[in-house]
Amino acid sequence: MRDILVVKCGGNAAVRAEAICADVAAAHRGGTPVILAHGGSADIDGLAERLGVPSRRLVAPDGVSTRYTDAPTLEVVQLALAGSVKPRLLSALRAHGVDAVGLTGLDAGLLVAARKSAHRALVDGRRIIVRDDHSGRIVEVNDGLLTTLLASGLLPVVSPPAVAEDGGAVNADADRAAAAVAGAVRASTLLLLTGASGVLADRHDEGSVLPVCRVPRQGAPPVVTGGMGIKLIAAREALLAGAGRVLIGDGRRPHPVRDALAGACTEVLLEEEE
């Protein structure tokens, strides 16, 4: 395990990306190798609305919701992440004196995904098969590229899309992409920053943050509402892949990274094997 910090900047509009960049820059300047991963759900939804592309979700039988990525939506995803969110983060890091390199999964095969040929989803209570969704699950990370950049004193800023095994681009969940990166580089910590205080015992009570959330090694996570299900799945994947610990923290704080690392978060642990 390496003393690498992977921070995922959530795409929720309430997340304070500038504050995350300030904390990430401070950690980098302090000598901690940092990889910043990001999504951009608010930017994707906003651009889709401006372009007249419907934003739709797929709900899996276990209740976990993901973005439905048809061909027009895939184009929106690429434009929003590579053309809007990433330049904004790079500019913020540069303003704090950090030399960062922006990468998508397409760069040098950074994120390789297995294209999903079909999805099982629930629509109006009925199970259906969706076959035109351009998404995939990450199966390989070019960790050598990331460690080379870190060794050069640079800060990688990474995001979907990923490259499929057939060479085409596919969307991938940004939390699971961050988890794959954390596992590949055997990061000491993966911090997922979101628009909530952490994993809540009661999603209507911001004060009900769980200090620890245990997830099963397979099957549905204990919480699926509010977008937390996919984060807990990502956390499980990171831990199983070799990341040291996974934290879910509040990206709305003035110092989101610093506060989460100091304990203002939920730590995700794997349930003990039977």
Image (cartoon, grey):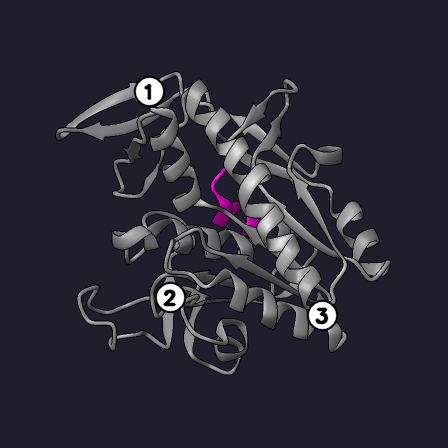
Does residue 149 appear in this view?
A: yes
Image location (x, y in percent) of residue 116: 47, 24
Q: Label 1, on which residue?
A: 130
Q: Residue tagged by mark 3? A: 28
Which callout, 2 or 1, points at the residue further toward the start of the chain? 1
Q: Nearer the viewer, residue 215 or 96?
A: 96
Q: Residue at x 73, y 66 (%)?
A: 33
Which is closer to the viewer, label 3 or label 1? Answer: 3
* Quarter holding residue 13: bottom left
Region in magenta: 172-180
- Label 2 sits on what residue type? Arg
Checking the image for residue 214, the label placed there is 2
**Amino acid at dot 1:** Val
Q: Nearer the viewer, mark 2 or mark 3?
A: 3
Corner quadrant of residue 155: bottom right
- Residue 56 vertical placement versus 143 (above, below): above
Classify 187 as above or below 32.
above
